[in-house]
Amino acid sequence: MRLCCFSMVKDEADIIEDWLRYAISIFGPGNVVVLDDASSDGTSDILFHYRSLIRTERVRSSAAGPSKGELMTAAMNADRGAYDILVPLDADEFIGLQNSWRRSDVMQVFEGLDVARTGRFKFPLTYQAIPPLSAAPNGIRLIKDFSVTSYEFFGNRRTDFAKTFFSARHFISVDSGNHHGASACERVDYTDFWLYHFPARSLDQFAKKILNGARYAGLWEKYDKAQHWRRAFDAYRCGELESHYRKVFVDVSKHRRAEWPSDELTFIDDHPNLPPRCRRS
């Protein structure tokens, strides 16, 4: 099974190196494509460090166009002839199973997918990371508590909302959130994959993320989407972002204690096909 992962990142220096190393260990050298959306926090330097193992391009997105979805669609269509499966992921999303991040387990699921008769594949369940308030070195590895959720029926208003990846032969397009997209084949398969999501790693990181979203000019006025971003930005403007952060990310039910993400990220620090880590923590 020929796999390729695609991502568009902006100012993700605190997580991008762990994400890159894990993605390369799963998909293989040369099979990770990263669009750098004009990052200014050191993310670009980390991408450059891995330039021999990934394909990367600097871009600039906006709601006026080109949007994230348009840029990702172009990159995925450019490569669709060389692969069986195209996997769009954000840099805070990691593929795993309910109890494992081992590559052999992940690949077993990929190998069982019917790419000839299926257009889209879903991550039906998500481990949502429960973050600390303050940042710490290698902070993602310290996050071991998760809540369990599904994006398929998001806010009881939208269906078919779980994150999606695609059979390359049927692929047409992906949307800006990797939720829907379009495929020439209507069949959808709900896979055994779990998505491990780390959208917030500290209050300061989340504040910067929200401001970057606000600069994505006109998105909230133009589209009835991204309401979670809008609520966070409203809280920021009212001086209530910490309260919002605690309510949405911290003071939630802890459904699972998961050690294996941290263990796997530590294990691949010594991966024979990866260069030494950058001197960032």
Image: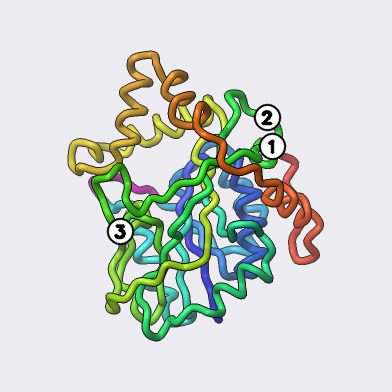
Residue with the mark numbered 3? 160
Disc 1 secondary structure class: helix
Task: Give the number of the disc on residue 281.
Answer: none
Q: Which range of residues does the magenta coloring cover?
A: 60-64
Mark 2 or mark 1: whose residue is earlier in sequence: 2
204 left or right of 268 in image:
left
Point out residue 281 in the picture as x, y percentages from the top left corner: 71, 37
Q: Are marks 2 and 3 in contact (CB under 8 Å)?
A: no
Label 1: how many Cα within 10 Å (few below 14, some 14–19, many 20+): some
For this orientation, the residue located farthest to the bottom is 116
Residue 74 seen from this side: yes
Residue designated by label 1: 142
Disc 2 and disc 1: Cα gap in Å? 8 Å
Residue 270 image offset from top left, x and y in percent: 81, 57
Crowd tier of the residue under label 3, counting other residues whose Cα lies within 10 Å: few below 14, some 14–19, many 20 or above: some
Mark 2 or 3: in front is 3
Whole-Å distance between the Cαs marked 2 and 3? 36 Å
Q: Secondary structure at mark 2?
A: loop
Q: Is residue 116 above or below residue 24?
A: below
Residue, far left: 222
Q: CA distance from mark 3 to mark 1?
A: 32 Å
Task: Between residue 206 and residue 81, name the one nearer to us.
Answer: 206
Q: Secondary structure at mark 3?
A: loop
What type is the residue that disc 3 sits on?
A: Asp
The N terminus, quarter of image: bottom right
Q: Earlier in the sequence, mark 2 or mark 3?
A: 2
**Could you tell me the amino acid type at mark 2?**
Ala
Where is residue 214 drawn, in percent x and y? Answer: 33, 32
Q: Is 61 covered by the magenta stretch?
A: yes
- Mark 3 or mark 1: which is in front? 3
Name the residue that disc number 2 marks. 136
